[in-house]
Image (cartoon, coloured by chain):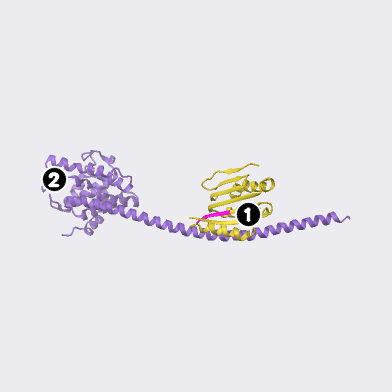
Chain colours: A purple, B yellow
């Protein structure tokens, strides 16, 4: 009789031990099953995620490509109205990118400037042919009309929330401003003119002077360089003129690569 | 004992546990602290079997997404049901969307693991 409480206790311990170990075995095997299932599920989910990401990336690229094409085409429309070649647009784009990069803007921003700068003259679509294609100099009234293309281009683009189009709006608006404040449409000066406008101004003039237009012959390089030296701090941002001369060889290379074919 | 109703969040399902014998868990289940979150749920279930006066219990699971800890908690939940299957008339509906294979597989696991429970897998379009 003395032993029975002890036996009872041991029996109880044994039973609870069995219960607990049963429970543990069940839990462990269940845990393994859960892990196995989870691994499979996670694999499937991650595969799906990667597929979706790839899809999004492809769409993103499609959007960007479309945006580029639309912008380039719009620029080309603007240029074609004034009988300039598509290569003017390409050269200005490339010059702008190089100026931006050497000025210290990021690779991404410089690439955007390259894409947006072709639209600088889009406002010309609203300028009458008679003025746009007039051989020889404009009279004052004609020049006033011609000047409106900057404002018109800006008005066409300013409503967009797309970063690239916003940039293009700024460029269209400010590419005829001059560093000394005598440009148009606003007559702003110095670094109040957006860097995008200052860059496109120099890129556009460099290319325009070196190309034949309906109203003028192409300038000799030396004459262009002289003008740039004279206009440093007048028409153009002196920092950008310095960059232009420092990297002159690469600008001339681009001009050769995208030379107009006659 | 009282009804337990927990509003749905981004990470946790809408939970309704009614003393009249109706339980539903609907939504996603990937809380940060899964075991903490489901503690009152398991507690309520235990109390229901200890104190509840109704004879039958119907449970609806409609879980779109769940983490592995939730999966473990659901097994624990089914364990409690399994322990009490003699005392109450229990019916479980495991509902899943036709495209949701993971949810279907989880439901099939419960059917495999608890052959004596009355579990219906329902596929919705």
Question: Which SS class for mark 1?
Answer: helix
Could you say which is closer to the camera, residue A72 or residue B83? B83
| Dominant SS in magenta | strand
Q: In front: mark 2 or mark 1?
A: 1
- The quadrant in which the N terminus of chain B is found is top right
Q: Is residue A149 visible?
A: yes
Q: Is residue A108 left or right of residue B45?
A: left
Which residue sits at x=50%, y=57%?
B100
Q: Does mark 1 fall on the same chain as mark 2?
A: no
How many C-alpha atoms fall within 10 Å of the one at disc 2: few (<14), some, or many (≥20)?
some
How many C-alpha atoms fall within 10 Å of the one at disc 1: few (<14), some, or many (≥20)?
some
Q: Is residue B31 visible?
A: no
Q: Give the labeled residue for mark 2.
A: A131
Q: Give the labeled residue for mark 1.
A: B78
Write down the region rendered in magenta. B93-97
Q: How many numbered badges does the structure rendering display?
A: 2
Q: Is residue A150 above or below residue A252?
A: above
Q: Is residue B94 magenta?
A: yes
Q: Position of residue A44 (x, y in %)?
A: 49, 60
Q: CA distance from mark 2 to mark 1?
A: 85 Å
Which residue sits at x=60%, y=46%?
B17
Question: Which SS class for mark 2?
Answer: helix
Which residue sits at x=33%, y=47%?
A163
Q: Position of residue A199 (x, y in %)?
A: 26, 47
């Amino acid at each position: 009789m003395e032993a029975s409480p002890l036996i009872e206790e041991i029996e109880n311990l044994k039973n609870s031990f069995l219960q607990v170990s049963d429970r543990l075995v069940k839990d462990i095997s269940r845990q393994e099953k859960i892990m196995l299932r989870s691994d499979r599920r996670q694999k499937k989910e991650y595969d799906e995620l990667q597929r979706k990401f790839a899809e999004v990336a492809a769409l993103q690229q499609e959007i960007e490509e479309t945006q580029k094409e639309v912008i380039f085409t719009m620029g080309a429309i603007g240029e074609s109205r004034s009988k300039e070649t598509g290569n003017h647009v390409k050269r200005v784009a490339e010059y702008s990118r190089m100026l931006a990069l050497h000025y210290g803007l990021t690779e991404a921003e410089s690439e955007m400037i390259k894409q947006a700068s072709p639209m600088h003259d889009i406002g010309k679509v609203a300028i009458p042919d008679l003025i746009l294609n007039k051989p020889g100099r404009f009279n004052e009234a004609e020049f006033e009309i011609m000047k409106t293309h900057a404002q018109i281009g800006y008005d066409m683009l300013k409503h967009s929330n797309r970063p690239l189009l916003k940039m293009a709006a700024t460029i269209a608006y400010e590419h005829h401003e001059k560093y000394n404040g005598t440009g148009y449409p606003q007559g702003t000066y110095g670094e109040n003119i957006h860097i995008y406008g200052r860059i496109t101004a120099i890129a556009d003039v460099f290319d325009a002077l070196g190309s034949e237009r309906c109203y003028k012959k192409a300038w000799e390089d030396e004459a262009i360089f002289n003008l740039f030296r004279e206009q440093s701090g007048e028409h153009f941002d002196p920092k950008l003129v310095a960059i232009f001369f420092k990297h002159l060889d690469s600008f001339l290379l681009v001009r050769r690569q995208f030379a107009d074919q006659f | 004992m009282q009804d337990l109703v927990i509003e749905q969040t981004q990470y946790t399902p809408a939970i309704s546990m009614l003393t009249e014998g109706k339980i539903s868990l609907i939504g996603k289940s990937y809380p940060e602290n899964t075991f903490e979150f489901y503690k009152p749920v398991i507690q309520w279930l235990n109390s229901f079997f200890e104190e509840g006066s109704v004879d039958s219990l119907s449970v609806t699971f409609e879980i779109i997404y769940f983490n592995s800890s939730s999966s473990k908690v659901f097994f624990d939940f089914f364990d409690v049901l399994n322990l009490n299957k003699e005392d109450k008339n229990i019916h479980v509906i495991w509902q899943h969307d036709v495209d949701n294979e993971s949810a279907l597989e989880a439901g099939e696991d419960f059917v495999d693991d608890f052959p004596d429970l009355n579990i219906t897998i329902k596929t919705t379009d």
